[in-house]
Image (cartoon, coloured by chain):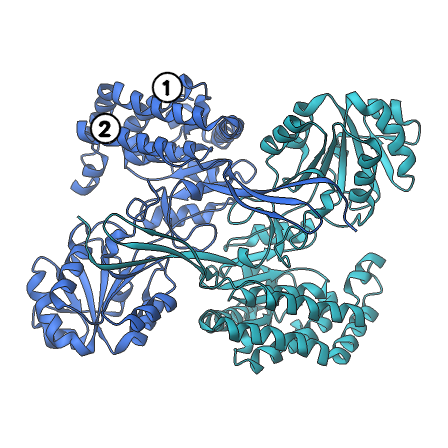
Chain colours: A cyan, B blue
Amino acid sequence: MSLTLPALVPGADRANVIRGVAEASRTASRMVAKASAEVRRTALTAIADAIEGMRNEILAANANDVAAASKLSAAMIDRLRLDDARIASLARAVREIAAAEELVGRIDRTETRPNGLIVERVRIPLGVIAMIYEARPNVTVDAAALCLKAGNACILRGGREALESNRALLAAVQAGLVSAGLPREAVQLVPFVEREAIADLVALEDLIDLAIPRGGEGLIRYVAEHARVPVIKHYKGVCHIYVHSGDLHDAVEIVRNAKVSRPGVCNALETLLVDSSIAGAFIPRLVAALPEVELRGDDATRALGGPSVRAATEEDWFAEYLDLILAVRVVDGVEAAIRHIEHYGSSHTESILTTETLTAERFVREVDSSTVMVNASTRFADGGELGLGAEIGISTTRLHAYGPMGAEGLTTTKFVVRGNGQTRT
Amino acid sequence: MSLTLPALVPGADRANVIRGVAEASRTASRMVAKASAEVRRTALTAIADAIEGMRNEILAANANDVAAASKLSAAMIDRLRLDDARIASLARAVREIAAAEELVGRIDRTETRPNGLIVERVRIPLGVIAMIYEARPNVTVDAAALCLKAGNACILRGGREALESNRALLAAVQAGLVSAGLPREAVQLVPFVEREAIADLVALEDLIDLAIPRGGEGLIRYVAEHARVPVIKHYKGVCHIYVHSGDLHDAVEIVRNAKVSRPGVCNALETLLVDSSIAGAFIPRLVAALPEVELRGDDATRALGGPSVRAATEEDWFAEYLDLILAVRVVDGVEAAIRHIEHYGSSHTESILTTETLTAERFVREVDSSTVMVNASTRFADGGELGLGAEIGISTTRLHAYGPMGAEGLTTTKFVVRGNGQTRT
């Protein structure tokens, strides 16, 4: 599928062109699903080889994207840029996915019914995945590899800032597919850069089994509003740590790690809840230990933290700053902490720091976020860190997947029933 | 929540009233999720007791519905009608759900990561379920009981034909809830009978976690078109049997069971594929054995079956008759059978009758319907028959659940991560 610039395709035809892409994807998905685990593993290895072999073309294409991206923020350009180390890392990720446990055909359960029917649940691919994202070319490779691992075809729609990079990476992916005897249409790019193409894509209820948007809240809401296919998504990560008890030095280290190690990602800490029983000792330490972080506190926090703590407004408790800003609130006990999270949280990740087992267990039981932690940094809410292998996304809605989602989330199970002539009475 | 007749509530307020119902449901869902397994079991047992104890009120209400339903078909009235035996059966189903395996809090997996983090997947309720159905009052009780079993609250929207019956059953359900100390708002009815109330309900993305429509294709399409919440559904069941080889008497018995035992349900046989290698012997037997069934065949079938077989049109291969009609086609081998199912099927249930293991395994592997069978009647595609306990619905879309769905399908898992101070490098 060559990429057509929008001016070359009249708008009236766009939906039909995208339907054609999806039909080819549906056909290819059947061939991928039928392929043996060995063929899919061979294809993934060939993709990793092709990414390394086509390094120069990929870097040249990426340089064009970076040159054209002068209006983007430095952080955006950093996400867009590829270099030798990042290309090596892309190829390594694909090899790890190739080596991971095989999922397709796995029998998750077997039961023999009283009438002799043997009922199995057998893991199968979802079919066709539409992946909609922004300017991170690594998502192109990760998504293609995870979808193939799980036996799916995929249609990728990256940001226009990464178009040249994605075309070059797609060429490597398709070269790998073809060398293993799989159809190149198993991984395709949407050949339009305008946003309306996303709406055309996610309307194809008969051809696409799942849409996964990743990126800013605006993109995700656009997909959710236009989708007629199922969507797995999270709008934002307003992650909390509740410091209840324990070593205050350790607590500050965990808070620092959660807020400062990578503030622009969805598992970064955004609101800190401090138990009133330790606030007097903890908050001055916090202020001293996070000089580069702007703190926004409630009255109790400001009274203890001094003039450097700005006054938090109601909006701060809902905010996903993605920046070196932290909202801080003093709460009276675990119940108040849970109620705060229930009201202001985003169902992403929350952690309690405590030495009291019963309090930890109550927090774990009653906080219904997709990842709930005890005595650990929220930054571990990540498919790789939690043992899923690579991650295709994080879900904060509860259907199908809740929390980080890896290759297994790109599969489902069917019932296989074996009998010897049974009829139902 | 008392039921308000539509005339008493101006249309402009409907959406707000329904939002209020859903907010109460959300609050109640937290209390149900927090309740112990024993409390939920006690509530279910109390509901079963209340259904039996309020038998006379329920039968009187149902008699009003039946009296008002004179315009409905005999089959519809049969589905609507309750009697002593059906009430006993409703109560028994609730007791069976109460006695089934506990799901909430079950730890599905545990893994210790190299850094010492212990990662668990813990089963939790989905939250608030919206159940939209037609004139079968038994769905009111089954859905309420399954949702409670899985720790959820639910909002029920049955057909207006069953309104009085559903109000009486709701009174029993809420009496059971209250006697166990759970909020009556854990199970509510939508207090409007007009169809637009369904659209209001399934638009509440912030309050409802899942909508499950059950009924005719028109109702299900209406829900899918208006939903902003995830929907688990199947439009129709165009179930196939492919007679490949084996004892032809047994094959006719299975076909007869699949078509005739209950033709109006979604797992009934609709299209029969007959391998050309046995068609000459099989089709005359079929015609003789199913005199009450109207057969619609392709040319080969008509040549072998004689003048009683009508000519099938293209539409017949897509048809869900829900009646004593069967489409019959002769196919050349398993590949042709699989292609037919792929093109015309509904992803519901297909069965192969064969003595050849390799052919059976190919059919099982390549047919991607939610239930694939070997040597058994399609009528077994049912949650109870396949070991799920009671069934809340059948999904032919692959997200979250595929095939019959029981109480476990009304739960998901969250990640619980236990550390001792880990930070991410």
Identified at 92% across, 26% down, the residue is A306
Q: Nearer the viewer, residue A47 or B59?
A: A47
A387, above or below B73, in the image: below
Label 2 resides on the chain identified as B
B212, above or below B360, in the image: above
Q: Is residue A159 visible?
A: no
Q: Nearer the viewer, residue A191 or A7?
A: A191
Q: Where in the figure is residue B354, as x and y percent of width and height?
A: 23, 69
Label 1 resides on the chain identified as B
Q: Where in the figure is residue A333, as x and y percent of width and height?
A: 70, 22
Mark number, residue A22: none
Identified at 88% across, 39% down, the residue is A290
Q: Is residue A409 left or right of residue A64?
A: left
Q: Is residue A271 visible?
A: yes
Identified at 56% across, 72% down, the residue is A41
Mark number, residue B87: 2
Element under disc 2: helix
The span from disc 1 to disc 2 (Cα, nearest Å) is 16 Å
Q: Where in the figure is residue A191, as x and y percent of width and height?
A: 62, 71
Disc tally is 2
Residue at mark 1: B175
